[in-house]
Image: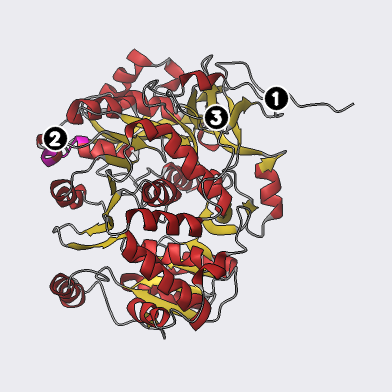
């Protein structure tokens, strides 16, 4: 007798929007290359990507042009360099017009993309080169100076150097290039043998007609590796998450299913302030909004936030993705508050906890919601999102279609509703594993479930709330304190601009809660006032014992506050 496994309970589906699929049974495209080609045929001459520099200069490429130049890059990889299918191509650039060309061209070539943060040190670059062993590196000229030191660790055979001015109008590109070379000296002659990006494209373009480009990806299926996305994961050691074509195509479809009722194909304008090499912007902004036929406005560097002003003024932005610090910062920018984007429909937050005070202020300033979702690099990344017409404040929403999530204890047993436990997830977006790290993979994926390392609760409706990172939890005299809760409380104080909370060594008590606070310009705040405010809202053991005021907090390039750096400082002090 055959035993049929019962379908998992998914109470959250009753909050899905009308017409929204509960499961996505079939991928919308057989691979990413097919998706790129199909969408390009549909939208042709419509603008696909625009670059917007802080001074308003930039350039644009249509869907047809992106398709053409990504074909040329695929030919460069396979017909000029003679790389085999599955060869790895590293891409190290901020948001620029070269980014989608290289990414899409790599997929069309049947090769594997390695996204690398351009702000990495030479040592960090060398370690990724050694682990991922790319055959080609495409790097922006501003950071090419780090290559000799990186290559001392591991050399990449072929180097292609791009520029922020690639595909900009001639006069604008020339002016920007002159400023980079002679005024701010951000671009210097490349210290290693290389090919320019434009030369590589020209070489590929010259081979058109000699090889049927579509043949390169004819054996690429949903299970084929598409991207190595490096992440600290749940252990802090940099690892390459193996994301397949199926992972990314399906997660793109899952994410769009959650917002379809608010999006019009071919008519949206998305502002991409998050870097495309970050998995959130890579899947949602680049892949998802390409699929929607949207106009993608890219800003290379959103800091300072005035770098975004021209983009908001020049384009009718209807959608924005970001992290809590981006929304919080814009809330406090006079130019943004005085002239909020009039075409904006809604915004999506991820990457870190969205604070209630920030979300409410955003609604007041823009008249539109910022809606929180949740995911990890290892899940391509989106796992949950708040349904647009059933947002539950303070939660990360409900699982996206075809996704199961539950909270478990240290033994893997599901905890009762409302009780904190580690969030684990299963679905078609879960990575194939960590590149060349089977033991790490076995620890993170068990019986098909991804163990996220995040502590969460589930309510009776199936909405989830992140309590905190498991490793960030503070143990005060045997009581668990979750920094997110304390930070969310302090964010409501009218004088607090930014806050981070960590645990610090504290003798017999084990750990003490310490708050690092950036005060709003012109405001005043004392440690005693901070503690008094917390005592009004939190039980005593959660109130920060220590308070330190700073002019700024350490952040990742995405804008996520680095608690680990603050914690490391405190541990170093304790050992001194």
Instruction: Please state the horizontal and vertical placement of residue 405, each as a whole percent of the image.
Output: 59, 29
Residue 127 drawn at (x, y percent):
54, 66
Residue most toward the right? 1
Are the residues flagged by discs 3 and 2 in contact, CB closer than 8 Å?
Answer: no
Image side of residue 526 versus residue 460, left or right: left
Q: Nearer the viewer, mark 3 or mark 2?
A: 2
- Picture quarter with the N terminus: top right
Dot 2 falls on a residue whose secondary structure is: helix
- The residue wearing badge 3 is 455
Going from N to C along the chain, the mark reached first, 3 or 1, is 1
Question: Is residue 527 something one can see in this rendering?
Answer: no
Q: Is residue 395 left or right of residue 551?
A: right
Q: Please give the residue where the numbered disc 1 appears in the rendered image.
A: 413
Which residue is most to the bottom? 193
The tally of labels here is 3
Q: Point out the stretch of residues depicted in magenta.
A: 331-335
Mark seen at residue 295: none
Q: Which residue is mark 2?
A: 337
Give how far across and how far down residue 422 sits, in percent. 60, 30
Where 88 sits versus 566, above or below? below
Q: Is residue 434 magenta?
A: no
């Amino acid at each position: 007798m055959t035993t049929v496994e019962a379908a998992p309970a998914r109470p959250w589906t009753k909050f899905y929007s009308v017409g929204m699929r509960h499961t996505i049974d079939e991928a919308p495209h057989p691979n990413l290359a097919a998706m790129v080609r199909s969408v390009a045929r549909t939208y042709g001459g419509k603008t696909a990507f625009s670059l917007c520099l802080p001074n308003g200069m930039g350039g644009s490429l249509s869907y047809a042009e992106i398709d053409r130049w990504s074909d040329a890059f695929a030919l460069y990889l396979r017909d000029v360099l003679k790389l085999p299918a599955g060869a790895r191509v590293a891409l190290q650039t901020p948001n620029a017009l070269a980014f989608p060309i290289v990414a899409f061209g790599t997929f069309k070539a049947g090769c594997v993309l390695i996204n690398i943060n351009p702000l990495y040190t030479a040592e960090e670059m060398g370690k990724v080169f050694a682990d991922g062993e790319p055959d080609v590196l495409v790097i922006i000229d501003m950071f090419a100076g780090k290559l000799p030191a990186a290559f001392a660790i591991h050399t990449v055979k072929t180097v292609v150097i791009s520029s922020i001015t690639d595909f900009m109008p001639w006069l604008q590109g020339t002016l920007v290039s002159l400023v980079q070379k002679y005024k701010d000296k951000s671009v210097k002659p490349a210290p290693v043998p290389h090919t320019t990006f434009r030369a590589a494209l020209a070489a590929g373009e010259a081979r058109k007609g000699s090889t049927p480009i579509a043949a390169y990806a004819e054996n690429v299926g949903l299970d084929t590796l598409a991207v190595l996305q490096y992440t600290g994961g749940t252990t802090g050691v940099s690892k390459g998450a193996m994301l397949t074509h199926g992972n990314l195509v399906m997660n793109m479809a899952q994410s769009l299913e959650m917002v379809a009722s608010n999006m019009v194909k071919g008519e949206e304008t998305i502002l991409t302030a998050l870097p495309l090499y970050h998995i959130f912007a890579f899947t949602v902004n680049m892949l998802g909004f390409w699929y929607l036929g949207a106009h993608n406005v890219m800003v290379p560097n959103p800091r300072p936030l005035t770098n975004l002003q021209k983009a908001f003024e020049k384009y009718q932005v209807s959608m924005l993705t970001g992290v809590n610090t981006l929304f919080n910062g814009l809330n406090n920018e006079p130019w943004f508050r005085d002239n909020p984007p009039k075409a904006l429909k809604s915004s999506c937050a991820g990457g870190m906890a969205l604070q209630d005070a920030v979300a409410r202020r955003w609604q007041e300033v823009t008249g539109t919601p910022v809606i929180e979702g949740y995911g990890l690099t290892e899940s391509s990344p989106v796992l949950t999102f708040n349904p647009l017409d059933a947002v539950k404040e303070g939660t990360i929403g409900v699982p996206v279609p075809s996704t199961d999530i539950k909270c478990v204890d240290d033994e893997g047993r599901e905890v009762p509703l409302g009780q904190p436990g580690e969030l684990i997830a299963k679905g078609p977006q879960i990575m194939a594993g960590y590149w060349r790290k089977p033991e790490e993979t076995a620890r993170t994926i068990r019986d098909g479930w991804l163990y996220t390392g995040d502590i969460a609760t589930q309510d009776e409706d199936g909405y989830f709330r992140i309590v905190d990172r498991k490793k960030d939890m503070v143990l005060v005299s045997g009581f668990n304190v979750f920094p997110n809760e304390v930070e969310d409380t302090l964010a409501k104080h009218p004088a607090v601009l930014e806050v981070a909370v960590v645990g610090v060594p504290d003798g017999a008590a084990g750990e003490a809660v310490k708050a690092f606070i950036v005060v709003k310009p012109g405001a005043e705040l004392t440690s005693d006032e901070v503690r008094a405010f917390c005592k009004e809202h939190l039980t005593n053991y959660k109130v920060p014992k220590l308070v330190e005021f700073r002019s700024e907090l350490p952040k990742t390039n995405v804008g996520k506050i680095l608690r680990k750096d603050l914690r490391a400082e405190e541990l170093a002090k304790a050992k001194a």
